[in-house]
Amino acid sequence: MHTILVYDSGHGYNNHMESDLQGTAQLTFISDQKEFQDQLNILQYDLIVIELEPPAEHALVLLEDTQKKCPYTPVIITSSSEKAELVVRTMNRGASDFLIHPVSKERITLALERSIEIRNQKFEIDYLRRKQDVVYDFKDVVAVSACMKDILQRLERFSRTDSTILITGDTGTGKSFLSGTVHFNSPRKKKPFVKINCANIPENLLESELFGHEKGAFTGADKQRIGRFEQANGGTIFLDEIGEISLSLQTKLLRVLEEKAFERVGGNRTIYADVRIIAATNKDLLRQIEEGLFREDLYYRINVLPVRLPPLREREKCIIPLAEVLLEKLCKSLKRRDITGFSKKALIGIQAYPWPGNIRQLANTIERAVILEDDSLIHEHSLSMPSIRSRQTDTQQAKRRGEADPAAAAEDEGSSLATQERDLIRKTLEECLWVQKEAALKLQISPRALNYKISRMGITHPHWRRNKA
């Protein structure tokens, strides 16, 4: 339901609006000019209606003041005068519409809908300065592995609700893509979808980015700016890397979740925004709660519908289909229509590689290959990946040595496996912040077995008690 503030000069022309817009909007009528201006400082409205009667100067001044205080809020002028000069003057001062009394129910309803639509378009234009890369349909998401099929089924079910979703997973697993898919399959799909990466914005500017600021709020704030939450009103906001938000900002975010209300930086006017939040992080928020870096109450508010996206190495059946989809997309964007696919060796290399950077690394690798390749197929040398090439070279060399000396080949193979095991243990420890108990759980071995392997392989960390001693 929209909120409308009506300035009535006392003639009572606008009294019928309340019955005309019943069920569509909530109206507040004020006839005192000072009280009207004070109300603008208290609450943010979706629409403002000002009655203008001759002499019109005081109403025009009121219109100008309203525009300064609420530049993004549409203002409709109502009047019994049909003078063209008056209409032109009001429209030049920023009015979105001019209605002549008596105003019919159909006319005021149309003016309301059109003004709100124009406001939403301004919000989207202000935000959508670049094309969003989003998968719009769940059917277009590559999900061949059983784990991904299950996740998509859950997300499709979650998209029908308004509850907050927390998507966790390694960097590059597709959290941003799937957040857009959820929005565009939800009842809010016709409203704005706003994405913001909390890690890319300095802490001192993030609050302004999320909630906006008033003119003069800080050095450089030369005009009012609406924030992402206000832009996303009625739609969805995606907060990527939510684990990077400071504790003070987490408190304000908690209020938005609980009350759907906030104030701009430097302002005291309460703004209400009906926004569905999808949050994402590659951090262990429970670990951050233990370390005092993340609020526990905020965690439970955003973790209503949790989803963990597995890394690419855990969805092996998806790797080749993803590579083919990405190749087709990149060939179109880079205008390489002559490339038709991958060579057999390239496909083997792509499938064998663990992809620590996940889908993002896969996309970047293929993009580079499309630029470098001269043939109609992407070959392994164009992938420009030392890890793939060295692994293939090592395999070939081991094969040749095996033909010459089977015993040496067996020794090389054992050494290679030991190196791979050590690298896997180190990588898992890093992902688990060097907590051996969690690493053992992730590796699916006992803590005692992991401790033995760590000692045997000489893996150390300065925070471990035995290393400090």
Image (cartoon, rainbow, N blue to C red):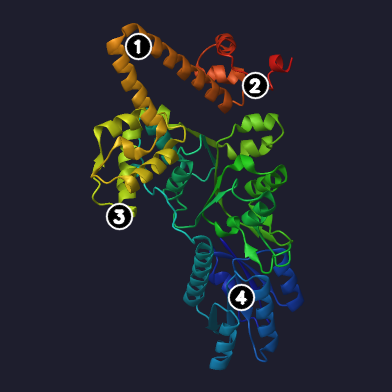
| Element type where label 3 sits in the image | loop
Q: Is residue 139 visible?
A: yes
Q: CA distance from mark 3 to mark 2?
A: 49 Å
Name the residue nearer the viewer: 126 or 451.
Answer: 451
Q: Amino acid at mark 2?
A: His
Q: CA distance from mark 1 to mark 4?
A: 84 Å
Q: Residue at x 54, y 82 (%)?
A: 98
Q: Which residue is mark 3?
A: 335
* Label whose residue precedes the other's in the sequence (1 or 3): 3
Q: Residue furthest front?
A: 404
| Element type where label 1 sits in the image | helix
Q: Is residue 317 visible?
A: no
Q: Amino acid at mark 4?
A: Val
Q: Nearer the viewer, mark 1 or mark 4?
A: 1
* Label whose residue precedes the other's in the sequence (1 or 4): 4
Q: Amino acid at mark 1?
A: Ala
Question: Which disc number belongs to residue 49?
Answer: 4
